[in-house]
């Protein structure tokens, strides 16, 4: 009986250790770069999987609202987050690996029928900008003095922001051109007439990166850095 209980204990301990050692990869729905589905896919997700295939690391990819993924990567050990833009404000909070995909321009958009000038930050300040908490656009506008409840309106995802744009609850949304058509299609607004304006973070790096939480084991970080270099060589 004691032997049987010992075996059960060792099996349970092994399972816990295996679960703790597994790399938690977190992201958001950002088509066509990251696409929600039974299996998470997309252009950048493909690159992540190829990079990790050069390692022996066990991992699972989970898709959450951006704010939750960012919180997990900031507070939990052994977490990898992608795609994340490398900014001065984020620099010291993660172990960075870049680029996992080329630079992507991000602009503000308005309805063509809206008279607000989207090429002027001061004009945008008179309206309401739809953003997601914790994302690059949110940080950009907060640094420029925009305030929640006044000229910033927060949502959990960009599809909600687009719906608010259509109904007039916000004047401006922030989008990458590559993902805009996917999102409009998902909400049945393919023919929506939008106008682009100000580039967000112009002059900053807008490369796609992956970042590992500060509590991640050095051995894991080194393996992924090595895998990344091998992957880069294959892209040449």
Image (tube, rainbow, N blue to C red):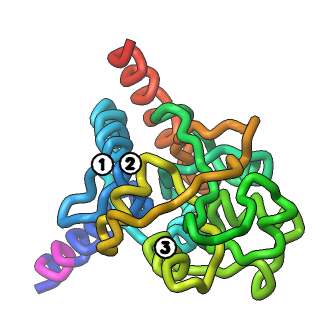
Camera-nearest residue between 22 and 107 = 107
Element marked by disc 3? helix
**Where does residue 199 sit, x and y in percent of width and height?**
68, 47
Q: Which mark is residue 42?
A: 1
Residue 6 in magenta stretch: yes
**Image: 167 above or below 12:** below
> Mark 1 or 3 closer to N-term?
1
Which residues, given as a range, are shown in magenta? Answer: 4-8
User: Quick check: can you spot residue 72?
Assistant: no
Separation (CA) of disc 1 from disc 2: 5 Å
**Image: 79 above or below 57:** below
Residue 72 in magenta stretch: no
Say which residue label 2 marks: 33
Q: Quadrant of the C terminus?
A: top left
Q: Which quarter of the figure has residue 213?
A: bottom right
Separation (CA) of disc 2 from disc 3: 18 Å
């Amino acid at each position: 009986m004691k032997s049987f209980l010992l075996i059960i204990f060792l099996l349970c301990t092994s399972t816990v250790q295996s679960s703790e050692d597994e790399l938690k990869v977190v992201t958001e729905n950002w088509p066509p770069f990251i696409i929600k589905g039974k299996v998470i896919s997309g252009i950048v997700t493909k690159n992540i999987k190829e990079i990790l295939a050069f390692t022996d690391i066990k991992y699972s990819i989970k898709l959450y609202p951006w704010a939750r993924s960012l919180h997990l990567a900031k507070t939990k050990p052994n977490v990898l987050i992608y795609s994340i833009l490398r900014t001065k404000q984020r620099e010291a909070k993660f172990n960075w690996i870049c680029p996992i995909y080329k630079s992507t321009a991000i602009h503000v958009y308005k309805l063509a029928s809206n008279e607000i000038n989207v090429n002027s930050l001061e004009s945008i300040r008179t309206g309401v900008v739809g953003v997601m908490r914790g994302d690059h656009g949110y940080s950009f506008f907060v640094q420029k003095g925009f305030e929640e409840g006044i000229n910033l309106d927060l949502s959990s995802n960009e599809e909600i922001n687009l719906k608010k744009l259509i109904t007039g609850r916000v004047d401006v949304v922030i989008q990458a051109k590559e993902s805009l058509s996917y999102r409009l299609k998902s909400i049945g607004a393919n023919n929506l007439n939008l106008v682009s304006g100000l580039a967000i973070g112009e002059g900053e790096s807008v490369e796609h990166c992956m970042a590992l939480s500060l509590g991640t084991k050095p051995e894991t970080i080194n393996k992924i850095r090595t895998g990344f270099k091998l992957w880069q060589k294959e892209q040449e």
